[in-house]
Image (cartoon, rainbow, N blue to C red):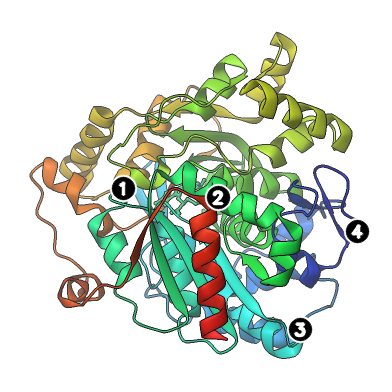
Amino acid sequence: MKYISTRGKVAPIGFIDMFLMGLGEDGGLIVPETIPTVGAEQLKAWSGLSFQELMLQVFSLYTNGEIPEEDLRKLVEDSYAGFTSPDVLPLTRIHDGLSVMELFHGPTFAFKDVALQFMGNLYAYVAKKRNEVINILGATSGDTGASAISSVRGKEGIQICILHPNGKVSRVQELQMTTVQDENVLNLSVNGNFDDCQQIIKELFADVPFKTKYHLRAINSINFVRILAQSVYYFYAYLQLPETARASGVNVSVPTGNFGNIFSGYLAKKMGVPIRQLVLATNENNILERFIREGVYKPEGFRSTHSPSMDIQIASNFERYLYYFCGENAAEVSARMERFKAEGQLTFDAEEVARIQRDLTAHSVGNEECLATIRKYDEQYGYLLDPHSACGVAAYERAGDKSEGAFVSLATAHPAKFDEAIRLIGIEQKFPERISELFDKPQRQVIVDNSKEEIAERLVDFYRVSQ
Ligand SMILES: Cc1ncc(COP(=O)(O)O)c(C=O)c1O
Ligand SMILES: N[C@@H](CCOP(=O)(O)O)C(=O)O
């Protein structure tokens, strides 16, 4: 298995090189040359496997033997040892028609831990085995940053700098990132929004001499390893359903912002998980819904919502979807992305929209609907959703055909991370101890302008000092 770029100008590379490259050096996103498939018999044989065993099976299809099996097993076991549920990602039945897959039992209470605990360990492994310098650079709307920091804090040979939008993450998310005192962690709080942070890191990654000189590594979903690790929970969700329930496949409702969560499902489907509908749930930042319903991919005004981690306009993984949509034609992807850069939008004709709608359905969930969904599920089912998971459940409610296949909605964060929204509906929740103890700790962060140059200077200083 080799890896190539959606823009076609990266010579095929192996698994570890792909992991280290992060963003393609031609500005595209890395994808596998071919997607391996898992037949129905094989899938059946995997039922009953733990999440860790499933992860090993899926990764073995992609790692080319570059990581010996016993090393991969240890990496996987270590990565999920800190999850508090024995099932790692438990599937909870809400009612006959709906189950929720809880992806938030990791150390930072968000689904990002599923991939990032593993990636932190993998970076430490590669740093040691290949003597690589690992200087992680990431952008976050709150959860990726907290999770990535927790996965590498204090680890030898690794430095991490995370950009988050100043004042636009929840209080708990901010504390999870900024109360970490390890010297290998730098938090930059940017006067801008998440799209600004993501734009800056993408420009720094695209500056290949700078990236090479400072050994910049990615933890965001531009890194294909993130997507691959996330694809495993779609296998697990399907296989955890009772055999009768999954007999005609599964529908999955997916809160998404950067298109990473849902693209992982699209990949799992291509690998062979019998997913019927992939329902894309967004908040009021609804560029992805407009793309799917109307065939127009055009960023519009940024809105702050009750689900701040999905306050995203420009979705990184859109380009990966475009690649498959264009029949894996890199020249076509490059031309369309050039057009997007020049004109600020992409449009798709009626035949193309019909094709997109065969892959994905979409619902954007307004602030009021989000709160009403949290209230309803608390009152009727005694289940407290966080605002991102509530977008997923609201989209499930609005999804059209529910007659075939079981329905699973992904619960992507613990409600304690977003108490600002939960309080608005008058619910007082009890925080897990690991969250309540954050409020007494001192914070460490640097507030910076939304300026690539200023941020590059900070990075150079940080990497010099910490090496
Ligand atoms: C809690 C939560 N749910 C859902 C999402 C959506 O994930 P993605 O942007 O990777 O699609 C995010 C981050 O964007 C998140 O932090
Ligand atoms: N919601 C994310 C935004 C970054 O997305 P990623 O999946 O590319 O890391 C966050 O919490 O930071």
Mark 1 neighbour class, 10 Å CA radius: few under 14, some 14 to 19, many 20 or more? many
Which secondary structure lies at badge 4?
loop
Residue matched to label 2: 200
**Which one is earlier in the sequence, the residue at label 2 or at label 3?**
3
Q: CA distance from mark 1 to mark 4?
A: 39 Å
Q: Can you name the residue that lies furthest to the right here?
A: 11
Local SS, label 3: helix
Residue neighbourhood size for the residue with mark 4, other residues' Cα within 10 Å, grouped as few (<14), some (14–19), many (≥20): some
Label 3 sits on what residue type?
Answer: Glu
Which residue appears at 46% of the width and 86% of the height?
Answer: 154
Q: Which residue is label 3 attached to?
A: 69
Image coords of residue 151 (percent x, y): 49, 76
User: What residue would you read off at disc 1?
Assistant: 168
Q: Which residue lies at the image location 64% right of the left edge and 37% below the top edge?
A: 318
- Residue 12 shows which numbered tag? 4
The nearer-to-camera label among 1 and 4 is 1
Q: Is the C-beta separation of discs 4 and 3 under 8 Å?
A: no
Instruction: Tell me the residue at 71%/11% (across/down).
Output: 349
Q: In the picture provided, is 382 more to the left or to the right than 69?
A: left
The answer to whether residue 89 is visible is: no
Kindly identify the amino acid type of the residue bearing the numbered disc 1.
Lys
Residue furthest top in the image? 350
Quarter-of-image position of residue 446: bottom left
**First of labels 1, 2 by sequence position:** 1
| Label 4, ligand 2: CB separation under 8 Å | no
Left or right of 278: which side holds 163? left
Three-letter code for the amino acid on which mark 4 is drawn: Pro
Front tag of 4 and 3: 4
Answer yes or no: disc 2 within 8 Å of ligand 2: no
